[in-house]
Image (cartoon, rainbow, N blue to C red):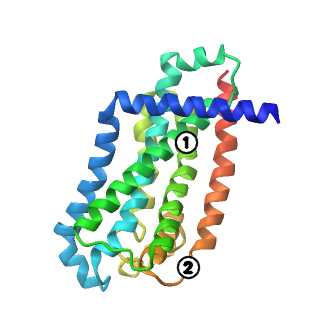
Amino acid sequence: MTDFTNGLSDILVITQRNLIRYRRLPQLVIFSTVQPIMFLLLFNYVFGGAIQQTGTGNYINFLLPGLIIQSVLFGGIQASVGISTDMSSGIVDRLRSLPISRVAFISGRVLADTIRNLFVVLIMIGVGFLIGFRFEAGIVNAFIAVVLAVSFGFAFSWISVAIGLFVKNPEAAQPAGFIWIFPLVFASSVFVPVQTMPEWLQVFARNQPVTKITQAVRSFTAGGSHDALIPVLIWMSVITVLFMGLSVWLYRRSQ
């Protein structure tokens, strides 16, 4: 019990260290917030009129849940850059000389990024309300939708951590983190209904995790069936367990 308490305390200290870094480098938070807001405004006002014809109803209510998922995924990519930067700058060597949990470094990074993702999601929802977005299924379902989205970002952050530990170079970590995200985001229901895609692409788009989480979040913001919830929980559990274990192994191997 004491080891668990000490490990948890170490994780919280590393989390605080990363949050303080965000406070001292506010441009990190500012740019990670401005980008999704730009996506929201551009897609709603530039493409919204054309996409409205696909039968999505009020497009902002269709768009915002998908963009929230895109934002937490893109936000998680920063973990790969941050981890590789710390690995190459000597911070990790200093931490290893201290009597702290060996997994506190990577867990604290993921938790700090999750908190930042929550902040970005709330800002996006606020901007969405200003341009017409509404939670149509009630406040409780709205809360569940936010928790689902942030939890999904938490799970995918472990993929970014594993990439950062494997690549170890900050310049290589950013493209390595982005390259696998783009097919998942754009070949999904984030921006348009899956049925508007070619049939061969629909098979992939319908069954990949980004579409499932987007459908689940939309079902809680706009009402409707929660059929996608169970697949989402399975995807998140598998990804978290698999890549958390891989990240811990890569971190220990780097010692």
Residue 96 in the image, given as x and y percentages of width and height: 65, 18
On the rendered structure, is 246 left or right of 187?
right
User: To which residue does mark 1 refer?
Assistant: 111
Image location (x, y in percent) of residue 39: 26, 58
Residue density around tag 1, few if under 14, some if 14–19, many if 20 or more, within 10 Å: many
Quarter placement of the N terminus: top right
Residue at horizontal 71%, vertical 18%?
A: 99
Q: Residue furthest front?
A: 139
Q: Which type of secondary structure does the marked residue at label 1 adopt?
A: helix
Q: Is residue 11 left or right of residue 69?
A: right
User: What is the CA distance from the residue labelled 2 to the residue labelled 1?
Assistant: 27 Å
- Please say if 191 is above or below 247: below
Image height check: is 101 above or below 68?
Answer: above
Which mark, by number, is residue 226? Answer: 2
Give the mark, 2 or 1, whose residue is nearer the N terminus: 1
**181, 83: nearer the viewer:** 83
What is the secondary structure assignment of the residue under circle 2? loop
Q: Residue, x 36% and y 62% (percent of image)?
A: 67
Residue 144 is situated, as x and y percent measured from the top left of the image, at: 52, 67
Q: Position of residue 55 (x, y in %)?
A: 30, 86
Q: Can residue 205 be seen in the rendering of this structure?
A: no
Above or below: residue 6 compared with residue 48: above
- Amino acid type, callout 2: His
